[in-house]
Image (tube, helix red, strand yellow):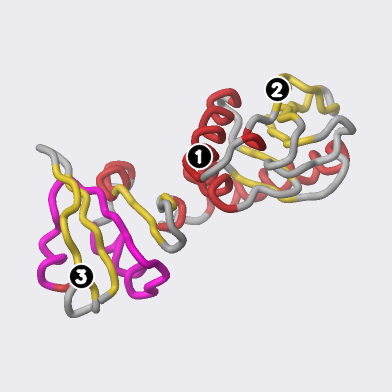
Amino acid sequence: MKIAVVENDNQQTSSIFEPGFIAVYEEDGGEWKVLNRFENKVCNARGMAAVRMAVGDTIKQLGDVKVVVASEIPGIASGTFQAAGFDIFLVDSNVLDVLDSIKEDMLEALEKRQEEPRKFDIMEYLEPGENKGDFSINIEDIMFKNPELTSKKILIPYLKNGEFNRLDVVCGHMPKWFVTDLGAMGFDYETVNESRNRKTVRIVCK
């Protein structure tokens, strides 16, 4: 198992927004060894777009690693890691003191995932927008990866919670129920972007 750690010079976990390093550890014969270590450039990013890009570059450098440990990974950085399928552990400790317990937690979680059918969680797919409460979601991608889901199953539970200001829905075509149901649910909608095979429909509270 490989684990990425945001750390400082003293091998203490640190915030993704503090200068330091990102190291990839792998267990070898009961010991954790560093496979790769590079400068944490996310800390230099300013603004949400820059943070998203810096985290994306970090994810590319991490290759097949899907676990990241830090003392803090707030906001858009956390969302970008989660959207890429990462498990995030937040601990403030010496790195070598926590890797064994994180490995155990990951193995237990893996066993549970294999035992239980995986529940769909829309939060894994929401992309934060420029303003607080703005999100976008690509339902085409979700339905491709989860053939059992429909646009209603994906969106209606989230719409009922209403925990957003604006939701941009990227789709191949506008679902018919947008026309029949959204108004009754208390929402307005409009097409804000359209190409041959793709639309972006913006949903807002009335």
Residue drawn at x 75%, y 28% is 25
Residue drawn at x 60%, y 45% is 87
Q: Secondary structure at mark 3?
A: strand
User: Quick one: quadrant of the C terminus?
Assistant: bottom left
Mark 2 / mark 1, whichever is N-terminal: 2
Query: What is the crowding at mark 3: few (fewer than 14 residues within 10 Å), some, or many (at least 20)?
Result: some
Judging depth in this view, the residue of 192 and 154 nearest the camera is 192
Q: Would residue 1 appear left or right of 51 to someone viewing this image?
A: right
User: Residue flagged by tag 3: what amino acid is it?
Assistant: Asp
Name the outermost residue toward the top: 35
Q: Residue 107 location in percent, x, y? A: 67, 44
Mark 3 / mark 1, whichever is N-terminal: 1
Query: What is the crowding at mark 2: few (fewer than 14 residues within 10 Å), some, or many (at least 20)?
Result: some
Between the C-alphas of marks 3 and 1, the distance is 29 Å
Query: What is the crowding at mark 1: few (fewer than 14 residues within 10 Å), some, or many (at least 20)?
Result: many
User: Residue flagged by tag 2: what amino acid is it?
Assistant: Phe
User: Residue flagged by tag 1: what amino acid is it?
Assistant: Arg
Between the C-alphas of marks 2 and 1, the distance is 18 Å
Depth check, mark 2 against mark 1: the one in front is 1
Q: Which residue is mark 2?
A: 38
Magenta span of residues: 151-180
Q: Secondary structure at mark 2?
A: strand
| Residue 169 position by quadrant | bottom left
Q: Which residue is mark 3?
A: 188
Q: Which residue is mark 1?
A: 52
